[in-house]
Image: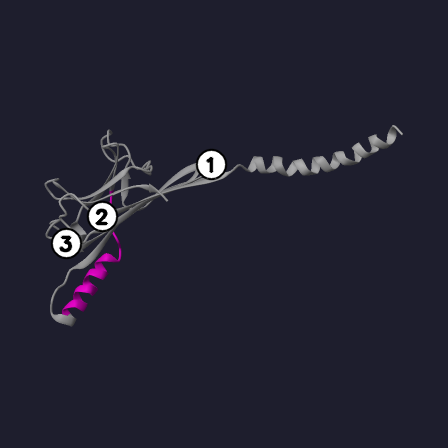
Amino acid sequence: MIRYPMMVIAALFPMVCILTVPSASMADKGSSTTSDVRANLVPCCGNPEPNAEGKAKRKTQTKSGTVKSDVFSADIEIPVPSAGLGITDATTADIRLVLSRGGVDYAECFLALDDNSDDNLESTRSTNNDNNGNDDEAGAEFQVKIQLKSKNGTPVLTQSKGQCDVNLGTPDVQPGVPNVEAGDVATASVVDSSTTRTLFLQGTFVQH
């Protein structure tokens, strides 16, 4: 009579072990989280270029508290020529995006003209001339894309388009992915040869 209950307990014990092992294994793998903040950039600041538009985004993926992928990108489109922005040639335009939090600037991105913009500008102008003899405004696209990925435990920074200075208090450009959070503000501007800025787009980042 004493052995029977003990046999039952002994038979159940391996089953309990089998059920608990997967849980321990899952804990070892850790959990993954994703943060995605975005901003729509709309005309602002006296509206020097009402036909400009843009967007910016930061997406971060972490696993077990470690950042696996951190990507910041922005895309701005403007008509060329633009009298309000003083742009007659898209290839020489200096388009920048300043990021701020609580009214304090903490990063500045330098956008690059999209590789296809030159072809698109010429194609659009040619089509407009053929259709009505007028040289209507064409659009130019400026972009920045910075990515930080962990490869074999080592962070690798890739600047696919343009670049961002993430430490404005240090001379020269300190490249990196801006630490954008919900509530931060992005302001686009064009900088001329005399370093005068004309602000023309602005937006606030929200959690997506």
Horizontal and vertical percent for residue 188? 21, 44
- Reading the image, the residue beneath label 3 is 89
Along the line of sight, the residue nearer the viewer: 175 or 98: 98
- Reading the image, the residue beneath label 1 is 153
Please identify, in this view, whether the residue under mark 1 or under mark 2 is nearer the observer.
Answer: 2
Q: Is residue 78 above or below residue 152?
A: below
Question: Judging from the image, what secondary structure is the residue with disc 3 in?
Answer: loop
Q: Residues within 10 Å of mark 1 (few under 14, many from 20)?
A: few
Query: Residue at the spot x=21%, y=55% of the render?
Result: 140
Q: CA distance from mark 3 to mark 1?
A: 44 Å
Question: Could you say which quadrant of the image residue 61 lies in?
Answer: top left
Q: Which residues are magenta?
A: 110-129
Q: Is there CB contact under 8 Å for labels 1 and 2?
A: no
Q: Residues within 10 Å of mark 2 (few under 14, many from 20)?
A: many
Horizontal and vertical percent for residue 98? 23, 39
Q: CA distance from mark 1 to mark 2?
A: 39 Å
Q: Is residue 161 above or below residue 80?
A: above
* Residue 156 shown left or right of residue 185 in the figure: right
